[in-house]
């Protein structure tokens, strides 16, 4: 078999394939190409000589298996062999400096001095003692103890007394007021609880005897026993939980007695719950108020007075809060049980509050309606008017509604304001009235000389206009002005007895220097109507009552810090010297001055 053509063809194709590897040939240099051509010519000469020898038959034992040799790989980083490449010339730079004459002399840098504010030393305890005219004594002692990192305890003692000596008053008019309060607080990781207790002792005299006794001899006046003492105490506590639907609860038990065998026990409990919903929060506030007490006698007879009232209520509300709008929609339901008179009553009251931010903090509009059942107590009555008689009728006041609307906000970063108008209705509102003077009979008790007050209940509608302005210029100066106008409409009584038509006040605090500080306040109370109930064969009662003049009470205080611990102060009260009557036939002390010192310390 003649295979030469076949071999030549295959060789030709192989050589052609090799010669067509342009990518490889292009990378060869000229010498490599010449060597390849010489090999090809030599190989072709050999093949031509074999053809001249003649034709032979070749038997193939093994089939032809061509192989492909590895091609030369392109270098990843080829060497640059360019005859046009030139070497970079080295360039040398020389700076030609010429000296220049100058008279400028730079000043050395000096850091600006910043005065550091002296840290204020805080003390956990202080004691105050002061003395003034009318033989007045003021004493205070406050102390706080850190038992551990989470627990602390404290107590507060206060004494305020005066021997009286009010001009124009013929009877004893001194008073004492002494109290001691203590507390214990523990702040745990998810819970805070507090326990507290206190006692208070007060002494007053019913010195506002009726003008009918102005002409009686001094011997009779000097023998009058007009003293009344109050002794009260309380225990209570509160607990607050974090991350719980039960937020907090407060409980208090208060007991009161006086020198006329009167007694009163008041127990209150107020739990609060909160249930977060998707877009709203459901809050549920509860209230339980139990009151029980007795008076030794009525005003006109020796028959005793007993009272026992249980009030229980629940107030659910839906609260929605976003960036500008706050809405609280709720209702309060109260049931009142009068166990002494076997009577019960159930009422519903609104609990609605709306607030909308019109212009950031500059203008906020708010409105709403509130109501509830308010339990009156002997303790609260004597706190407001210590000259009440121990012959009171005690019952709760039902505030059916109190609708209000107003605007509040800031005129600047240091000036805030609040204006509000409200209108409400109260059933069985407590009004102070003058107890009658016994005519023709000699009084047997110290409060029967037309010098004590009783309680008259009536349904009253009240219109109120309120305004407030506060200015705070850092800690150097602050000023506040408040004013409120009232208009009353009674159902049975001719007037809302002993309620003023106007209340206003101005108060300020200032720091003159780091050591010298002070403050001032002025209180204005408008006219009030009082009802004297005078009975006798020759005296006609005056159903229209009498008018108590308005009064202005100016007060000022100044203090000087001797050091971090000790400071001295001076206080002046009723600086206008007006012996105005806060209650009928009860003039107050004139100009009052008090000097004292306060000492801060740590145990």
Image (cartoon, rainbow, N blue to C red):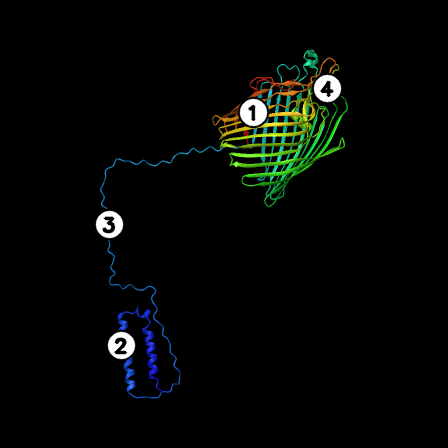
Q: Nearer the viewer, residue 151 or 76?
A: 76
| Other residues around mark 4 within 10 Å, as few (<14) / some (14–19) / many (≥20) | few
Q: Spatial distance from mark 3 to mark 4, Cα to Cα?
A: 119 Å
Position of residue 51 relative to residue 423, above or below, is below
Q: Which mark is residue 445?
A: 4
Mark 3 vs 1, N-terminal side = 3
Residue 131 rendering spot, x and y as whole percentages: 58, 21
Q: Secondary structure at mark 1?
A: strand
Q: Which residue is mark 3?
A: 93
Q: Spatial distance from mark 1 to mark 2, Cα to Cα?
A: 124 Å
Q: Quadrant of the C terminus?
A: top right
Q: Which residue is mark 2?
A: 38
Q: Spatial distance from mark 3 to mark 1, Cα to Cα?
A: 86 Å
Mark 1 vs 2, N-terminal side = 2
Q: Quadrant of the N terminus?
A: bottom left
Residue 423 rendering spot, x and y as whole percentages: 62, 29
Q: Is residue 570 visible?
A: no
Q: Spatial distance from mark 4 to mark 2, Cα to Cα?
A: 152 Å
Q: Secondary structure at mark 2?
A: helix
Q: Which residue is mark 1?
A: 505
Q: Are marks 3 and 1 in contact (CB under 8 Å)?
A: no
């Amino acid at each position: 078999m003649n295979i030469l053509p076949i071999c030549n063809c295959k060789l030709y194709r192989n050589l052609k394939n090799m010669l067509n590897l342009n990518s490889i040939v292009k990378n060869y240099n000229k010498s490599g190409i010449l060597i390849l051509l010489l090999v090809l010519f030599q190989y072709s000469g050999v093949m031509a000589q074999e053809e001249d020898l003649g034709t032979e038959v070749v038997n193939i034992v093994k089939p032809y298996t061509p192989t492909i040799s590895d091609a030369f790989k392109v270098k990843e980083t080829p060497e640059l062999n360019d005859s046009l490449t030139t070497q970079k010339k080295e360039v040398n730079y020389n700076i030609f400096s010429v000296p220049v004459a100058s008279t400028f002399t730079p000043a050395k840098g000096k850091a600006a001095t910043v005065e550091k504010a002296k840290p204020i030393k805080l003390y956990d305890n202080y004691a105050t003692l002061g003395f003034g005219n009318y033989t007045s004594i003021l004493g205070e002692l406050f102390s706080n103890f850190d038992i551990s990192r989470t627990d602390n305890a404290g107590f507060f003692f206060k004494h305020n007394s005066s021997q009286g000596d009010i001009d124009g008053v013929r009877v004893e008019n001194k008073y004492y007021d002494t109290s001691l309060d203590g507390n214990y607080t523990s702040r745990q990781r998810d819970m805070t609880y507090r326990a507290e207790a206190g006692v208070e002792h007060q002494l007053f005299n019913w010195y506002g005897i009726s003008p009918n006794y102005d002409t009686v001899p001094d011997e009779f006046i000097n023998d009058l026993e007009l003293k009344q003492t109050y002794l009260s105490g309380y225990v209570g506590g509160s607990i607050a939980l974090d991350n719980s639907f039960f937020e907090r609860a407060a409980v208090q038990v208060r007991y009161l007695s006086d020198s006329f065998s009167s007694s009163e026990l008041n127990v209150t409990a107020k739990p609060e719950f909160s249930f977060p919903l998707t877009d709203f929060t459901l809050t549920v506030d509860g209230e339980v108020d139990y009151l029980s007490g007795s008076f030794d006698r009525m005003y006109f007879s020796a028959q005793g007075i007993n009272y026992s009232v249980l009030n229980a209520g629940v107030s659910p509300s839906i609260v929605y809060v976003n960036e500008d709008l706050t809405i609280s929609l709720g209702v309060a339901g109260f049931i009142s049980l009068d166990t002494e008179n076997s009577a019960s009553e159930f009422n519903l009251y609104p609990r609605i509050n709306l607030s909308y931010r019109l212009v950031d903090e500059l203008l906020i509009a708010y409105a709403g309606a509130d109501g509830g059942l308010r339990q009156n107590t002997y303790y609260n009555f004597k706190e407001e008017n210590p000259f009440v008689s121990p012959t009171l009728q005690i019952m709760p006041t039902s505030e059916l509604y109190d609708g209000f609307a107003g605007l509040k906000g800031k005129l600047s970063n240091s000036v805030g304001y609040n204006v509000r108008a409200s209108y409400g209705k109260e059933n069985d509102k407590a009004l102070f009235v003058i107890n009658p003077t016994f005519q023709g009979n000699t009084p047997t008790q110290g409060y029967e000389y037309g010098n004590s007050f009783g309680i008259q209940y009536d349904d009253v509608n009240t219109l109120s206009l309120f305004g407030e302005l506060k200015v705070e210029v850092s800690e150097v100066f602050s000023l506040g002005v408040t004013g409120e106008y009232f208009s009353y409409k009674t159902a049975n009584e001719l007037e809302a007895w002993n309620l003023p038509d106007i209340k206003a006040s101005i108060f300020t605090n200032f720091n003159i220097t780091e050591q010298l500080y002070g403050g001032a306040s002025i209180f204005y109370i408008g006219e009030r109507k009082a009802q004297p109930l005078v009975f006798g064969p020759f005296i006609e009662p005056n159903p229209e009552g009498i008018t108590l003049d308005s009064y202005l009470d100016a007060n000022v205080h100044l203090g000087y810090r001797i050091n971090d611990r000790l400071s001295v102060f001076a206080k002046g009260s009723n600086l206008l010297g007006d012996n105005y009557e806060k209650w009928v036939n009860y003039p107050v002390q004139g100009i009052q001055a008090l000097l004292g010192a306060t000492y801060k310390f740590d145990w």
